[in-house]
Image (cartoon, grey):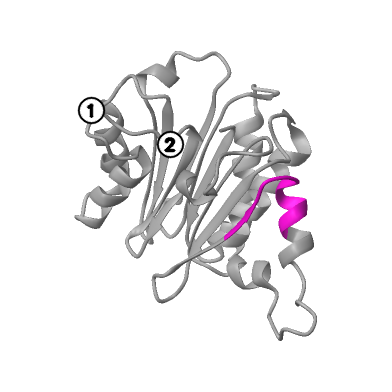
Amino acid sequence: MTIGIGAFGRRAGAAVLAAWAEAERRAAGDLHGFAVFTVLGADGEPESLECQRGGLATLRAQYGRAQAGRGQADALARMAEAEVAGVITSGPDRPEPLSQFLAAGPAGLVTGHRLPNLATAEGVAANRAALALIGKGLPPRHAVEAVLEGDPDIDAGLIAVTRTGLGVANSARVQGRDDLGQALILAADRRYGLGLLHNSIAPIEGLAAAVAAAGEAVLRQA
């Protein structure tokens, strides 16, 4: 998978959407295809929107306006207000269910890039293993590091997000690639944070910083 973005703080959902839009605007390569965009509601329950083709444009077309005759509010606008949010997106037509690529539960969510759904040596998907550690009280940074350090050959990078923190890490195998981008922003007062990992898109130089800045602009003003 090409890019994962995660954020916490006021309007984290909007921040992830802004960063995602910036990635699609600036970059070429494996984008504008499948996507899973997930937020945690105030009750801690995950809500997700998915597509196989078209990336953010498809979600905007399908969920960015009221659904006629159904009395359904603008899903993207509602999800933009969430305080925990993440997306994973790449090229089109990925194996179903798409939910396997982004793990979420009341404790937080885990997105990433490459193949965060790959099973670790213990037989558990890497993203779900990190989510389980968060559920046991491990901080996001320590959760992703524990999973990836325990299985250095796995082809995955992980971004774990809770309401109060965020962690980003690549496995040793992924660190050997020459097409990586990474950014991690944490406010000095820890009221917000945003992280991202990407591969297989260009340009490499400066892209992660620009994408992260677009997301941070939303968080800073919220």
Residue 141 drawn in magenta: no
Q: Position of residue 221 (x, y in %)?
A: 61, 62
What residue is disc 2 on?
116
**Amino acid type, residue under disc 2 in the picture:** Pro
The secondary structure type at the circle numbered 1 is loop
On whether residue 57 falls in the magenta region, the answer is yes
Q: Which quarter shows the N terminus?
A: top right
Earlier sequence position, callout 1 versus callout 2:
2
Mark 1 highlights which residue?
150
Q: Which residues are magenta?
A: 49-59
User: Are the residues flagged by discs 1 and 2 in contact, CB closer than 8 Å?
Assistant: no
Find residue 173 and report its image quarter. top left
Which quadrant of the structure image shows residue 164?
A: bottom left
Residue type, numbered disc 1: Gly
Query: How packed is label 1: few (under 14 Cα within 10 Å), some, or many (20 or more)?
Result: some
Question: Residue shown at 66%/30% (left/top)?
Answer: 207
> Foreground residue, 55 or 28?
55
x then y, percent, for residue 121: 25, 28
Which residue is painted at 58% across and 36% down in the image?
3
Residue 125, x across and y down, in percent: 34, 40
Q: Is residue 102 left or right of residue 3?
A: left
Estimate how packed mark 2 is, as few (under 14), some (14 to 19) or many (20 or more) residues with alpha carbons within 10 Å: many
